[in-house]
Amino acid sequence: MNEQRERRPRVAVVFGGRNSEHAVSLLGAGSVLSVIDRDKYDVVPVGITQDGRWVLASGEQRYAIEATVDESGPALALPTGEASLVALSPGRIPEELGAVDVVFPVLHGPFGEDGTIQGLLEMAGVRYVGSGVLASSVGMDKEYMKAVLAAAGLPIGRYAVVRDRDWRLDRERVLKEVQGLGWPVFVKPARAGSSQGISRATAPGELAEAIELARAHDPKVLVEAAIEGREIECAVLESLDDAPPVAGVPGEVLIRDDHEFYDFTAKYTEGHIDLDVPARVPAEVTERLKSMAVRAFEALSCEGLARVDFFHTPDGGIVLNEINTMPGFTATSVAPQLWAASGLPYPGLVDRLIQLALRRSVGLR
């Protein structure tokens, strides 16, 4: 009698999404699909189009994901051939998604990274990679993220929130209040990532236009006072046992001279930034960064992974800028590079995240 082969865990890699970070998600999913161990896992690629359709590949067919990254982003590029695809209407969830052991959502921004798909999977009792509903939602909304981080005693910069109703009804009052932050300021959507819709305003005359640019992505806008300092990022991973989360070596983002700040083009176009890893800071600063990154991870009750971004100021201080619960996830993205420098290469990182999700209980944790 032939011994039956042990069933491999079935992993659904979900990508695309209904937001302006659709293209960035495609790039990350393409990287994950290229390194995931097909001898260890059965893989089901699941694409979400920009109009909300869920599209499944059949059998072992691989997605051909092509993306030229700009802020508009391309549509999901899928293999041709009606026999190989099952296209589902918006709002209808593929039944196959409930027949997997774990979902790996390589999704960024609203309707993906913000707790929405996490809530869907919680209701279905399906394990998934990354943070849960609360951490994902708080991590996506920079206003509440900063409130939680400040309540945990972590140092954050000065900021103001521009709400939709206030901007529409009393714009002059809002502009006057925001100017109290001084100049320059950075204006960004409150609930978007990948440096989408961010601009730098250096004088009162530039502020309204910067707010309108951010509002094209989100009706709620965050305005942050500029912080002089080096931009240093630190990646955090949940431990496989009951040990505390661990932080990898920090890296410094070095922006080339043709960019005033770390904007979308600098982040996703080759040749505009360098990542100096490990960051060239004293050992004591490295340990403080790692400790604060873990504190931020735990303050939001994160799971799986996160990337925490800091400023190291000229006087030796550290200011926490933000935490990202699903950072850019190509092999050359910052968080995977930081883990590679810490001894965990990209294929191992992908496997580690799947293993963490498989060990997670369903329901309240």
Image (spheres, rainbow, N blue to C red):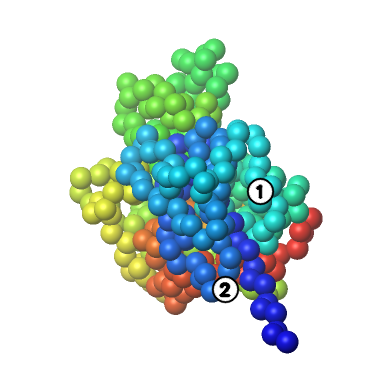
Looking at the image, residue 98 sits to the left or right of residue 47; the answer is right
Residue 187 lies, in percent from the top left, at: 42, 33
Q: Relative to 2, is 76 above or below? A: above
Give the secondary structure at mark 2: loop
Q: In this view of the protein, can residue 115 be seen by the observer?
A: no
Q: As drawn, which residue projects farthest toward the front? A: 1
Give the secondary structure at mark 1: helix
Residue toward you, 361 or 103? 103
Q: As drawn, which residue projects farthest toward the left? A: 257
Q: Mark 2 points at which residue?
A: 40
Q: As drawn, which residue projects farthest toward the right? A: 364
Sequence-first disc among 1 and 2: 2
Looking at the image, residue 116 sits to the left or right of residue 225; the answer is right
Q: Which residue is drawn at 46% across and 70% down?
A: 347
Q: What residue type is labelled 2?
A: Lys
From the image, state whether disc 1 or disc 2 is nearer to you.
2
Q: Which residue is drawn at 51% across and 19% down?
A: 167
Q: Name the residue under label 1.
A: 118
Residue 204 lies, in percent from the top left, at: 35, 23
Q: Which amino acid does label 1 sit on?
A: Gln
Q: In this view of the protein, can residue 201 be seen by the observer?
A: yes
Q: As drawn, which residue projects farthest toward the top? A: 169
Residue 310 lies, in percent from the top left, at: 45, 55
Residue 332 lies, in percent from the top left, at: 36, 61
Residue toward you, 57 or 315? 57
Q: Dot 1, crowdedness within 10 Å: few (<14), some or many (≥20)?
A: many
